[in-house]
Amino acid sequence: MISVIITSFKEPKTIGRAIEGFLQQDLKRKKFELIVSSPDRETQEVVKKYQKNNKDVKLFKDPGKGKMFALNLLFKKVKGEILVLSDGDVHIGDNALKYILMPFKNPKVGCVTGRPVSIDSKNKMLGYWSHLLCDAGAHQARLKRAKKGQFLECSGYLWAFRNNIVKNFPLDIPEDAIIPYYFMKKGYKMAYVPKAIVYVSYPKNFRDFVDQKKRTTKAHIQLSKYINLRKYPKTKTFKNELFESYRAFFYPKTIKEIIWTFLLFPAKLYVWLLVYYQLKILKKYHKDAWHATKSTKGIV
């Protein structure tokens, strides 16, 4: 059996499409359960409508203490041999579920990640940045590391791993950041499947952009609390972003895009400086809590 878990917080406008994306997948008679974890009533009501018409859809009313807390509870309940995780504000592409399950035919593969693709318009700076960071950034970095057999981090928008290998994980580190490290420590390999596409709407304003990047960056820095980074080096670091940034300059196709590309660098530097200031000076660490990036969810 395959267990699909969609985590969702205040996403009644997008959760339906996220659910439908999985229900429309062709799994060739493979059994699966689709569990939506949500703490808010608005999202839960949408899920209940899908439950009436499909017995595979299940609702988990999480206690509202954060995404990582909810997942730790769910990992003890799900039945599948493979767990597929996604979010309530994204939707997967055709056959994405089939593609992301394929690498598990190799018993040495423990984690598999899909490919996020931005649905935002390139005609605006934040939209262009989302395409650049997805295509020239994360996609190319994962391709390079996958070809070399190196460790690669998974995307929380769509990824999968074997069940009953990792029973729980810390609440102050996102699941997609730390669980792959646990698998690597146990001798498993990582896989990247570019055909397993997940469509994502990214922040539409600079404030949300900074807030989102700040949360993910801060969480990755805190990995050192649980992982020996000399033996298992992080992939998301300021140094890595600096040395791999050359790919960004081959991405723009117009003068406007060239200007926006150059503007991305001080924006990213600002995020890193803000993160180090909050961690080193203010001692404000990443904590488990539900966050709603309003400009990605159609929330006014």
Image (cartoon, rainbow, N blue to C red):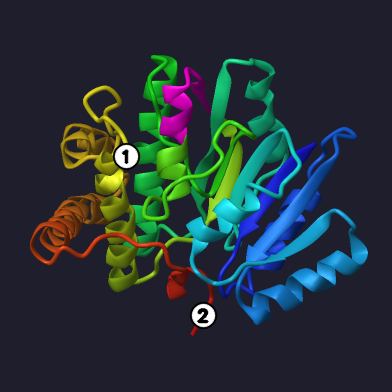
Residue farthest left in this picture: 281
Q: Which residue is mark 1?
A: 226
Q: Residue at x 87, y 32 (%)?
A: 28
**Where is residue 49 drawn, in percent x and y?**
83, 72
**Where is residue 44 drawn, in percent x and y?**
70, 74
Quadrant in which the N terminus appears: top right
Highlighted magenta segment, given as a residue range: 180-193
Q: Do the CB atoms of the residues marked 2 and 1 lie less than 8 Å apart?
A: no
Q: Nearer the viewer, residue 156 or 98?
A: 156
Instruction: Assess whether residue 53 is covered by the magenta stretch.
Output: no
On screen, residue 76 above or below 110: below
Q: Secondary structure at mark 2?
A: loop
Q: Which residue is mark 2?
A: 299
For label 1, the crowd category at 10 Å Cα-Cα, with few meaning under 14, some 14 to 19 and many 20 or more, is few
**Quarter residue 126 falls in:** bottom left
Mark closer to the chain start, 2 or 1: 1
